[in-house]
Amino acid sequence: MPYWKALVWFLTITSVFMSASYTMLVPFLPMYLIDELGVAQSDVNIWSGLIFSISFLISAIMAPIWGALSDKKSHKAMAVRAAVCLAISYIWGGFVQTPWELFAMRSFQGFSAGLWPACLAIMTSTAPREKMGWCLGLMQGGSTAGGVFGPMIGGILAEFFGMRASFYFAGAALGMIALGLIFFIKGEEQKKIAKSADKKKSGGSLKLLKVPVIQRMLFAAGVVQLAVMLVQPVLPLYIAELQGSMDNIVMVSGIVFSVVGISGIFAAPMWGRLGTNIGYRWTLYVALLGGGLFGVIQAIPAAITPFVIWRFVGGIFMAGIFPAINSLLAENTLPNERGRVYGLSYAAQQVGSVAGPIAGGLMATYWNNSLVVMAHGFVMILLVVMLYLKRPKNQDPGSGEQINSEASEPAENPPAPKQN
């Protein structure tokens, strides 16, 4: 088996463990604060918001910094650093005794950010150009699968072994990822990147931010994440409205949250292949438009069953968005710039993760919940219209044919990416 093919399967499994570790604490964090850390029930929402958001805020600042170091030093070393630090943070979370200690742990977790961008940089610097979409789609499917099963695993562990056990399990999973990265990733790939860097120096993150296509993709990544998180504050209450009661609301909400991820597990690799065939830019347009339309449609039914069905269909389209964005970012950067650009993309998503729930909560104050759910779809429709109107006029849209001779590694003098 070629190394790149073994690598994509290894990084996909890594993505599953990584995403599951991130999300397995979600179901019980408020109860952890109340039962284990002594927070009053009247204060738990404030503490939950602070503890969740601090990690996003710090990682938004640190991700581009770690990405730049990844390009300068080693993608592999940066991935190992992130995995080890995250493992330490989760184990620390199992020992905390006060909410301030948990806040400090989540701050350190945000400081440790960079595992997913480093994995993307490793993959895009190794995969053949014609297989890049499939590789990134497979990794995205793994990440989605972890996000689906993580809360379920966390809930089961908390039920049978106590809530602290979930932290220890997550720490062990990240420790296994670190060992796998140390022994599986070849150092030779970074030498190729360094050789490329000697021939074509990168201008750093500020230079990348001046490239129009990168500006658009970073903006798209942040807006999509904002749209996804927009419905988080209102979804449980909206589900209760649709079913007409609060009965089993935790279980039902978990199922409804999961359906988008379940459809995405199977759809993400197919979107990667589609991007290779028709171009990643057009694939992004189709995925955004479909996700937006079904985001609006899901808010129309007044019953829970059709709502879940339309969310499942919308999840098929949502699965194509980030593989297309990541592929376009790879096609418009040199190999020695991938860490920077994925760090910037991760930072943009973290900003969306913070802004989305805040915007959703404010909208719910003045609108009804169904309009907030519908707004999730309208945001993505507006985004795809903007991207289409701002598309390049003078080259094959989305194929990368004319901008990506640098993405095929053997080129002796890879040209700088054109500003499209």
Image (tube, rainbow, N blue to C red):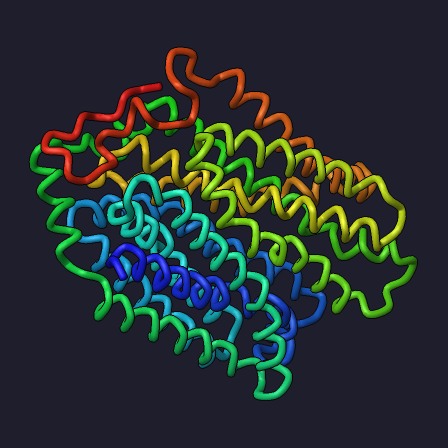
Q: Nearer the viewer, residue 66 or 378?
A: 378
Farthest residue, direction top: 394
Q: Residue at x 83, y 41 (%)?
A: 368
Residue 4: image location, x then y, percent: 27, 55
Q: Quadrant of residue 130?
A: top left
- 359 displayed left or right of 369: left
- 319 displayed left or right of 376: left
- 27 displayed left or right of 237: left
Residue 32: image location, x then y, percent: 60, 75
Q: Residue at x 39, y 70 (%)?
A: 89
Q: Quadrant of the C terminus?
A: top left
Residue 367: image location, x then y, percent: 80, 37
Q: Residue at x 37, y 29 (%)?
A: 214
- 233 displayed left or right of 301: left
Farthest residue, direction front: 1
Q: Quadrant of the N terminus?
A: bottom left
Query: From what the image shows, is residue 75 above or below residue 364?
Result: below
Q: Nearer the viewer, residue 161 or 279?
A: 279
Query: From what the image shows, is residue 199 above or below residue 74?
Result: above
Q: Nearer the viewer, residue 40 or 334?
A: 334
